[in-house]
Amino acid sequence: MEIKKSDCEAINIDIVNKVKPNMPDMKVLYELSDFFKVMGDSTRIQLLWALEESEMCVGDLSVLLNMTKSAVSHQLKVLRTAKLVRAQKKGKNVYYALSDRHVYTILKMALEHVCE
Amino acid sequence: MEIKKSDCEAINIDIVNKVKPNMPDMKVLYELSDFFKVMGDSTRIQLLWALEESEMCVGDLSVLLNMTKSAVSHQLKVLRTAKLVRAQKKGKNVYYALSDRHVYTILKMALEHVCE
DNA sequence: ATTATAGTTGAACAGTTGTTCAATTGTCAA
DNA sequence: TTGACAATTGAACAACTGTTCAACTATAAT
């Protein structure tokens, strides 16, 4: 049995019992919040936004965002780990591209929201 | 003029110049990342998920999520500041509700994404 | 082979975040 | 008015995050 951490009793126990079975399980919950965590950084949003326009290599992205290659590379790694972008080596350069159009849809929908 | 922080020259200057004018401005960028930051926490996602099912007071939410009222209240404040929920006092209790159906749509779309 | 360029990596640092704890406010019931 | 309960608040703490810096790998050109 689960350890009780709440410090009170329910006011409307019927509502709580009705809602409880519809709550997401922990696995889905953490996947969801991890996804939003990845999106929750302005550098990474710029990278996704830029890559929607065109494939680009790290150096180009670094000039575009006006940041060091190192900083860009670190953030691209986060996006790669989250499977939001994919990398392809061409000669001396590594070209990055969006790996999931779903993400851009969410980005645009969030844009509508913040601009309401 | 902007201070140059990137530590290299562009490889494909034509692509960079093509993409640059389509980049979001800083204001929109920070609003977007702030929005995703708010969504990027499992406690807050649970709260939004629960409130989609039914209005609830802090005590009920606290039992439902198995957390202290204080922790829940702190997170509700974050959601309130971000205008994602609204509060209404009824007697001794404060009832919270979603203030924007847009958000639930984004949540469901992200859910589809993580469950691909 | 040597040199230059593109990109990655890990450690370190400051800044931020979420929960806990204790104190406080506000409301209802006796 | 007193006591009990609902919710909020601020400080404190540990855990996490993003950029910088320096060192490193890998590829291409001479």
Image: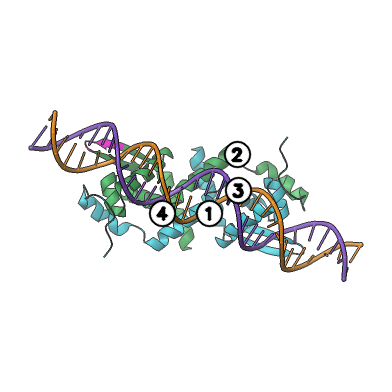
Chain colours: A cyan, B green, C purple, D orange
| x then y, percent, for residue A28 | 41, 61
- Closer-to-camera residue (B6/B15): B6
Chain letter for mark 1, please. Answer: A
User: Nearer the N terminus, badge 1 or badge 3?
Assistant: 1
Disc number for residue B42: 4
Q: Which residue is mark 3?
A: A43
The span shown in magenta is B88-92
Q: Dot 4, how many residues are within 10 Å of its Cα: few (below 14), some (14-19), or many (20+)? A: many
Residue pictured at 49% horizontal, 56% vertical: A35
Residue A24 lies left or right of residue B112; in this view the side is left
* Magenta stretch: includes residue B89: yes
Residue pictured at 57% horizontal, 62% vertical: A81
Q: Which residue is mark 1?
A: A38
| x then y, percent, for residue A102 | 53, 56
Disc number for residue B26: 2
Q: Are marks 2 and 4 in contact (CB under 8 Å)?
A: no
| x then y, percent, for residue B4 | 73, 42
Q: Both on one chain, marks 4 and 1?
A: no
Per the image, label 1 sits on a secondary structure element best described as: helix
